[in-house]
Amino acid sequence: MLQKNIGTEKAWQKIKHYCAYQERSHAETRDKLYGFGLYKPEVETLLSQLIEENYLNEERYAIAFAGGHFRMKQWGRVKIKYELQQKRVSAYCVKKAIATIDDADYLAALQKLAKAKLANLKSEKNIFVKKTKLRNYLMEKGFEGNLIMEVVNGM
């Protein structure tokens, strides 16, 4: 349901608060502005104002998203990249965000997840089934296939 146009001034106050609360992507913010019932010229004007005043920065958003989801949810680079693409973040920003994840921390997280999952699979007797389940779990978390194979074969 489209909301009645709330006016540019009121929308400006609301969207500033919305962007100051946490990092937002351009697409999220644009959708929110359209949700206020604004028209395309008003939306584009407010978006450029937000960018100029540094309330909105897609690169900063992508880096915060990648770091947060890696640390908190233990997501791999593949899943983070996919999610950022779903949020319509530019390829440049996605690449930059993925590059900020430290390789040593990344491998340590992968090892930790693999060990924890292996401990959960203690009851599984068949080694092939166990390795398949471990591989699938790590793939779901968004880690690269070659790294998963190294870790699984090393255990």
Image (tube, rainbow, N blue to C red):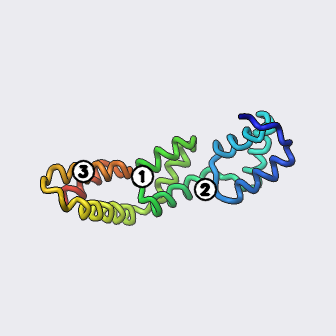
Residue indicated by mark 2:
60
Q: Quadrant of the N terminus?
A: top right
- Going by the numbered disc 3, the residue's amino acid type is Lys
Residue type marked 2: Arg
| Disc ID at residue 21 | none
Q: Is residue 64 left or right of residue 80?
A: right
Mark 2–mark 1 Cα distance, whole angstroms, equals 17 Å
Q: Residues within 10 Å of mark 3 (few under 14, many from 20)?
A: some
Q: Is residue 82 above or below residue 64?
A: above
Residue located beneath label 1 in the image:
77
Circle on res. 133: 3
How many angstroms separate mark 1 from mark 3 (CA)?
Answer: 20 Å
Residue drawn at x 47%, y 53% as measured from the top left: 98
Q: Position of residue 12 (x, y in %)?
A: 81, 49
**In which image quadrant can residue 54 be found?**
bottom right
Query: Which secondary structure lies at badge 2?
Result: helix
